[in-house]
Image (cartoon, grey):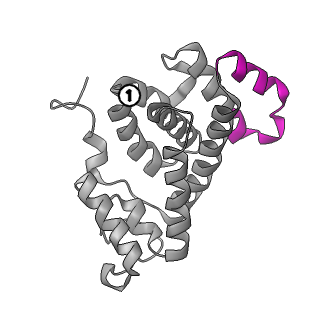
Amino acid sequence: MNDDAMGRFPVPDREELPDDVRERIDEEAERAGFTPNVFSAFAYKPSHFRAFFAYHDALTQDTALERAEIEMIVVTVSGINDCLYCVVAHGALLRIFADAPKLADQLATNYRAADLSGPHREMLDFAAKLTETPDKVDGTDFDRLREAGFSAEAIWDIAGVVAFFNLSNRMAILTDMRPNDRFYTMGRGETGGT
């Protein structure tokens, strides 16, 4: 675990964590080749760690969305919220899942200028609206998403990802969570991408 994963709270000692939390962190570190700082940071409060990652897993595993679409939403919402950790970490995941380094960078800075299909533009317009002005979401938003080809389940899943990552962004900002250096280069190819 990285002791400087976050700047405003202490990172707990790995050996003092409950067994299930330590096992989950070890599994992720083995899968990724490093421990993403979000795991080190959320271990600060094990009950919240469990709930956070259980919901994250449900959103990414029990969904009508493609994983690249989930990451598109995450990067867009995180860019709107100016969340450095999530833009960098999920930008890396988007580059990998969509094999699209340019798209990840476009969404991180201004999704409205990104090269998107019509359905993905509708999806991200909805994600932005739910993030910035949730009180303005109405039936016309649902109609546009349905016309773009999204099922009721997919609309639910889009909203779930938006809501979860608005929470995640705020916790990352609050804790001063820092992206792992590895995230900056992942999915860019051997030359760092162009």
Does 24 appear above or below 63?
below
Does 142 appear above or below 59?
above
In percent of width and height, residue 167 lies at 61, 55
Does 19 appear above or below 61?
below
Q: Quadrant of residue 121?
A: top right
Tell me, yes or no, whether the highlighted magenta stretch contains residue 77: no
In percent of width and height, residue 74 lies at 52, 40
Tell me, yes or no, whether the highlighted magenta stretch contains residue 135: yes
Name the residue located 37 percent from the left edge and 24 percent from the top edge.
102
In percent of width and height, residue 82 lies at 54, 45
Figure label count: 1
Q: Which residues are magenta?
A: 128-149
Which residue, as the protein is rendered here, is positioned at the far bottom? 16
Q: Secondary structure at mark 1?
A: helix
Q: Quadrant of residue 64?
A: top right
Q: Is residue 119 left or right of residue 138?
A: left
Name the residue located 56 percent from the left edge and 65 percent from the top edge.
51
Which residue, as the protein is rendered here, is positioned at the far left? 190
Task: Evaluate whether residue 45 shows in this view.
Answer: no
